[in-house]
Every structure is written in structure tokens, then in C-alpha cells.
Amino acid sequence: MSRRAVPALPRGQRADVALILEGTYPYVRGGVSAWVHQLIRGLPELTFSIVFIGGARERRGEAAYELPPNVVHLEEHFLSVPRPVEPPGNLEGDADFFAASAALHDGFRAGEITPAALDIMVGHLTANPDRCRRDFFYSRRAWNEITARYERGAATRSFLEYFWTVRSMHAPLFVLASAAANVPPARVLHVVSTGFAGFLATLLRRQRGVPLIVTEHGIYTKERRIELLQADWISDDQRVGPDTSDVSVGYFRQLWIGMFERIGRMTYQAASSIVTLFEGNRQRQIADGAPAERTSVLPNGIALDRFRAVRMSRAPQAPPVMALIGRVVPIKDIKTFIRAAGLVLARRPDAEAWIVGPEEEDPAYAAECRELAAAVCETRRAEDGAAAGAGPRIKFLGFRGVEELLGRVGVNVLTSISEAQPLVVLEAFAAGVPCVATDVGCCRELIEGGPDPEDRALGSAGAVVRIADPEATATQVLALLGDPVRWSAAQRAGIARVERSYTEELMLKRYRDLYRASFGG
């Protein structure tokens, strides 16, 4: 799918559903974006507005999807924007705003989010976001509040690091408070994560009183925690102090992690319906503060017709090709796939490994993966005695339509360190391709069957392995490619499971019913 400019849309039109999306549709391919596109196209009787939240404007790129005709509004908000330079002055700061802020932060520290305190803060932020931003960054009261909290909880640490961390954490929230005034009316708000998108949805929900649906594919706070633990832009400070709940994690990392956990809890508390894809994630949401009675499981589904022709055209034997279909980013752990591929290629000289997905999201990581793949291929050429000019057996194919590739794949491989309910597993099953996946999200449930005995009776559609285990991954790939009876049984199980429980028709009906129930409320 080629990238394209987004057409101009009428501004401010009322919609049935306002979708609030962070870093996804319509500018990023695959994953959640593909699901959003599927949802909008599958419910043509409803109108949608899209609120896109991104990092830096210059990194946004052009659209990866052509917007369906029932999208009536699109707006963008970018969090990495320079703050306006304020002239020097003697700004005292609004006493009521800082009292509301103190009450909210004290509630966070006590482990409680008081709806009344949150409503008061939302009132300040949405009534005059520019004044609140100016007060926070430039007033005497802000300085006094920050220094007082530093002295109470972080006095053993660098004040400069604390000061700039607090400012950096809050800056995006004021951008979103300003954005709340621009979102056109909608009958239902639907946010597809917590995080910054969830914060904006919470503001709109409390400001306007319309129902809020939260759908999480992966658990945002869990995935953010993984990213923040790996981030090299956060200062490491592991000294024990009053606010340190985990001495193995630096204090300033804990501040960032805690912020997203609190925003997640706020979003759950504001939501009228909280949806995820499988029971394990629902339990995680409840543990993170979601009211259990508002949670439900609505699995994803795929359009089976897209893959029937692929399946019917397949050769009866498994092609000696292992493929990872997904973004080339660290959370997909492409390097484990490459190392596993090297082990497979050592045993199967006829095999190939394909990496199918866009590389622009994290170019540095993509370059590291290409270097590792080149080294593995060079090792294989040297050990196999192949000619120096022989083509690489680990190939980066970029973004491709899955229908054009799955017919030539023998095993679909997922080495992710975090997933929810990956569509690519369902798509591969529908195309007749077994899967080897890490034990994340509901991959085990998809491959081996869920709690329903009839589902488990369908059999295993591949194999489940540990995270970051190239040896186990390679062993299972080789076992499937080398055993036609096992491969055929896995193929049949995958086809039966996706046709029984994971169709697009079922998913769209569930969301149509959810929207209608929300409209009625």
C-alpha cells in the first residue's frame, strides 16, 4: 500500500463516533491501524471523526490508508512542540488551579483518584488551557509547588533532573487540554489505548458527559513500561528514597512509569465500557484499576474471503520458508527471529527467512537488524561453501500485502516480547499457515485453544515458545517443516479455529451492538 496525502475534510462535523488514536491510524501501517480501518469500513452506517495524536509533526509522514467516506473529520495534535517563549514577568499563578492540582496529586500518592478532584482539575484545564499552561511553567506558585514536592519526596536526588522531568511529563498534558476544545461533537468517544489518547478522552468525557469506550489491544501501561525501562534518555538514579517502590528501577524512570499508570487508571474510571481481546488482558485491566463490571472481551476477527483463494492455491507440502510479518521495531524482537533463522538455515540449506514489514518507525533498530542478518548470512555462506555472490537467505521484503505472500510461507513466526491478539496469526491460519509464537498475549490461546473444550479439541495450530529463545524457535520451525503429518494437522487446526471464533462478521456485530448500547445510554 503506497503512502498518500490525506484529503481535505470538512471540519467540525458532528459524528456518531469520535476515535481518539495515539500514533496509529491513518499514518502507520498494520496492527491497530489495520483494525481501525477495518472497523470504520465495516460499519458504513456510522460516521466517524478521527483525532490523531502524534509525537513530532516532522516524523508523521503521509497517510498509509485512504480514509473511507464515512470519516467526516480528521484533526492532528503533536506533543513534541516548542513552548511559546513567555516574556519575563511577575506571575503569581491561579490559587484555585494549584489547589486543585495539589489535591489530585495527593490523591495519586494515596492510591486514590477522587472523581470530584478530577472534575475540578478538568474544569480548569478545559476552561482556560493556555492560562493553566502558563501558570504551570512560569508562575511563582508552580515553583513553590515543585520545590515543596521535591523536598518531601526526592531531596536526595538532583533537583535539576527532578525539575525538568516534572516539566517534561506535564507539557504534553497541556497540549491535550488545548486540543479538547477542537474535537467536534460525537455521540460516543472511543479511545484505542490509555496513555495520552486516554488522557484526552478522559477530559472530553468529563467535560461533555458523553459515553466513553476504551479498547485496548495490548495493555498500554505494560508496553510503555517496557519502552521506558529501555529508554536511554532517562537519567538512572537507583538510590533508595521515600518514593522508590522498586529499587531495581531508577527513580526518574519510576516517575514516568507512574504517570502512565495513573493516566491509565483515570481513563478506566472515566470509561463506560472497557474492552480488550482476551481474558488475560481483562484481568490485567482489573488489576490496574478498571471496574470489573465495565470490562468485556471482544476478540478481533478477519475477513476470511481474503484468504480462501490463497489457501486453495497452496501446494500440499509446506514451503521451506519461515516468515515474520510485522513492524521492524524492538518490541517485535526481530533479532531473535534472525538468530533463529540462522539456526534453521544451518539445518535446512533449502530454507529462507523473510522479514515482512515497514522499517521507518525505528530506522536505527532496522539498521542493526540488517547488519545482524548480513552477518548470519555471511556465516552460513562460509560454512556451506556457497559462492560469495549467492543471494541472502534472510530477506527484508518491506511492507507487503499478506495475501501475496502467505501462499509461499511454510511457518509464520512471531518473536514479540509483547502482543495482544495479533491479527497476523489469524490471517496466517486463514491462509493455511501454522504458527510458532512466543508465549505473549493470547498467542497460546490462538495456537493451542482457549478455555472452551471444543476449541481445544481442534488441536494445536503450531507451537508456543519462550520469549527471546532462538534455539527453541528454530527447533519448532524445523519440526513443523520436517514433519508433513504434523504440519498438515496444524494447518487444519488453525483453519478450523479462525473460522469458528475469529471472523470479521462476529467482530463487527459485537462493536455495532456496543455502539448502539452506548448511543442509547
Image: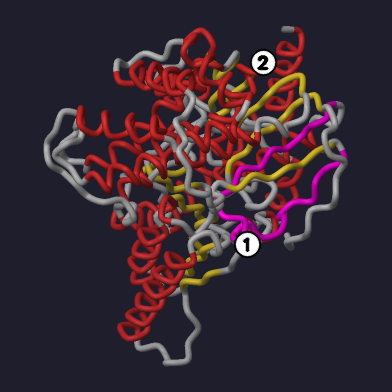
Amino acid residing under circle 1: Phe
Left or right of residue 70, residue 98 in this image: left
Residue 323 shows in the view: no
Asked which quadrant contains residue 185, the reply is top right
Instruction: Give the residue pinned by disc 1.
Output: 399
Q: Would residue 208 be seen by someone viewing this image from the given angle?
A: yes
| Position of residue 485 measured from the top left corner of the image (x, y, whole percent) | 48, 48
Label 2 to label 1, Cα distance in Å?
Answer: 37 Å
Position in image of residue 427 (x %, y %): 62, 45
At x 31%, y 56%, the residue is: 232
Q: Nearer the viewer, residue 430 or 259?
A: 259
**Pointer 2 residue:** 211
Q: Is residue 196 magenta?
A: no
Structural crowding at the residue carrying mark 1, measured as other residues with C-alpha within 10 Å and reported as few (<14), some (14–19) or many (≥20): some
Q: Which residues are magenta?
A: 46-69
The residue lying toward the viewer, choosing from 212 and 206, is 206
Residue type at numbered disc 2 = Pro
Q: Is residue 54 magenta?
A: yes
Locate the N terminus and report the quarter of the image it occupies.
Answer: bottom right
Classify mark 2: residues with Cα within 10 Å, few (<14), some (14-19) or many (20+): many
